[in-house]
Image (cartoon, grey):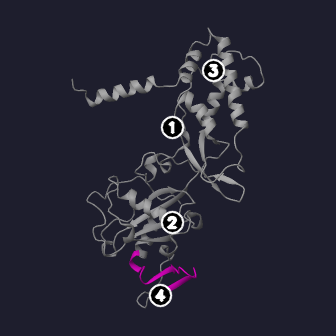
Amino acid sequence: MEVKDGSKEVMHEVQKADDESYLRDYERQLALSSKDNQEDWIDHCRELVIEYKKLAKNSKTCYEKKQGDIGYILSLNWLDHWKKYAYFNVMGNNNIPDFEESRPTQIKDIDNADLLIPKYQFVNEIDPKSHYNFVIKEDLRENVDYIVVDKDIWNFFHSRYGGEPLKRVYHKIYTFIADVETKFTRVNFVILPPRENCGSVDISQFYTIYSSMYDTLEELLVRIVTNMNSDQYGYKLQREKIKAWKFRISHSLLENTHRIREFVCSQDQYCFAIDSQSQQEQRTKSIIYETAIADPAECLEAVTYYPLSDFDFLSSTLIIEVLPEVSDYFTSNHEVTNTNTLIP
């Protein structure tokens, strides 16, 4: 008998449920029947608290972390819920808890959704599991809204409750100290058509992408090309056929659009370029254009090997110029709308 795709999915879900860890099932069974098994439940909670505190005490410090080590983000909302569930504060003082009706009797999967920017607000990676698809909100703070735990603590929770990991990488910032980069650098960018098409194509569409400040500009450009060539955006870009500029922005999206159009028309005549050897800004002025645009742009092609930490993208926009010889720079569906707007 032929098994339909829907049936396969159901069978997969059933198998997944059967494979849940013994610890997770045991703990939920105790929680659901806690009134009848209070002594067992108290012993179980005490074991949980003792094990968690032991793991936390043995966690490596920033002096012991190495370049490339992985940290795991944990929402403090979820952790506080777990502490109530396990009577963490009471158990920590070796007291016997009073069973409360309001106490959580179940813990759902580890959930960091309250920490994350909705994915529709920025350009996503083609790989759905990429850590660049999971961006922490810019106004949240470590140790206030979330904490970073090591693998042992993550496994302690994940083996019991499940959930998707939110990983971050440690980087050496000094000789003896490694720091975890919890938040990524926001880069707003716009794709400019070849100059002969600049008058007929809407260039007011701004996109947002997030990247590590330790990534080089070249790595970011490759990611932009790869992601914008996906079906969602429909471009057909080539890294060797684009030029990157940094353009200072204002608070007005309309004003930025006007200034960028002005830049497109005058970029050959008046711009700032960066010399790859001296790194000195050199101004070139055309005989034709006597008036410069309000904020000249910087060509970044000579410094793409620099890390993003060297660029001020909070007050500037990355312009991806498609070179004139690339006439077919997008497909017929390039007008796929994106809700991104320029964030000043």
Judge left or right: residue 95 versus residue 315.
right
Mark 3 and mark 2: Cα distance apart in space: 50 Å
Label 2 secondary element: helix
Residues at circles 3 and 4 in contact by the CB criterion of under 8 Å: no
Label 3 secondary element: loop
Mark 3 and mark 1: Cα distance apart in space: 25 Å
Judge left or right: residue 232 versus residue 118.
left
Residue located 56% across and 30% down the image: 159
Q: Toward the viewer: 34 or 52?
A: 52
Q: Return the residue at label 3.
A: 103
Among numbered discs 2 and 1, the one appearing first in the sequence: 1
Q: Return the residue at label 4.
A: 285
What's drawn in magenta, residue-wise?
264-283
User: Percent x, y for residue 4?
Assistant: 25, 28
Residue located 36% across and 74% down the image: 323
User: Percent x, y for residue 44?
Assistant: 65, 19
Q: Which label number is shown at residue 217?
A: 2
Mark 3 and mark 4: Cα distance apart in space: 72 Å
Q: Residue furthest top?
A: 36
Q: Return the residue at label 1.
A: 164
Q: Amino acid at mark 1?
A: Glu
Mark 4 and mark 1: Cα distance apart in space: 54 Å
